[in-house]
Image (tube, rainbow, N blue to C red):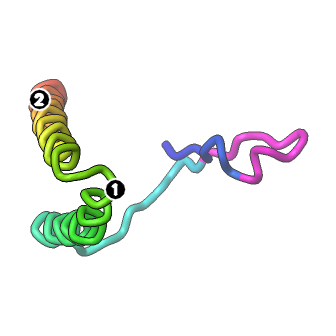
Amino acid sequence: MFEIGLDDPIRKLPGAKTKIAQDVEVVGNVGNFRTAFNLIKVFLGIGILATPASFQQIGIVGGVLGLMFVGILNTYTMKLQILAKNRAEERYK
């Protein structure tokens, strides 16, 4: 079921009711490999553009510590996502 988000302009109108679409069809031909490749391109691009400016503003020590913190946080959240995926697969077999 699809519901219009809270930030939707229709919802902000006085007396507006939430619209719900009963049948939402998702159409696409992008596979897992292509999706993963696009995500990698986006994250690498952002990192290449943002990292030098961040290091310049915060310094080398702060930059290295911040990068290590973000790496540890990313590893932790990746493990949580894998755990959630495995539990969802078990639940909906």
Considering only vertical position in the picture, is 64 above or below 49?
A: above
Decide which of tag 1 and tag 2 comes sooner along the chain: 1
Callout 1 amino acid: Gln
What residue would you read off at disc 2?
A: 83
Q: Which residues are magenta?
A: 9-20
Where residue 11 sits in the image (x, y, percent)? 75, 45
| Residue plotted at (28% across, 71% down) | 49
Which picture quadrant has residue 66? Answer: top left
Q: Residue drawn 16% across and 66% down? A: 40
Residue drawn at (30%, 57%) of the image: 54
Percent of width and height locating residue 52: 24, 66
In this orientation, which residue lies closer to the viewer: 75 or 51?
Answer: 51
In magenta stretch: residue 13: yes
Q: Is residue 42 left or right of residue 65?
A: right
Report the residue marked by disc 1: 57
The kind of residue on which mark 2 rests is Leu
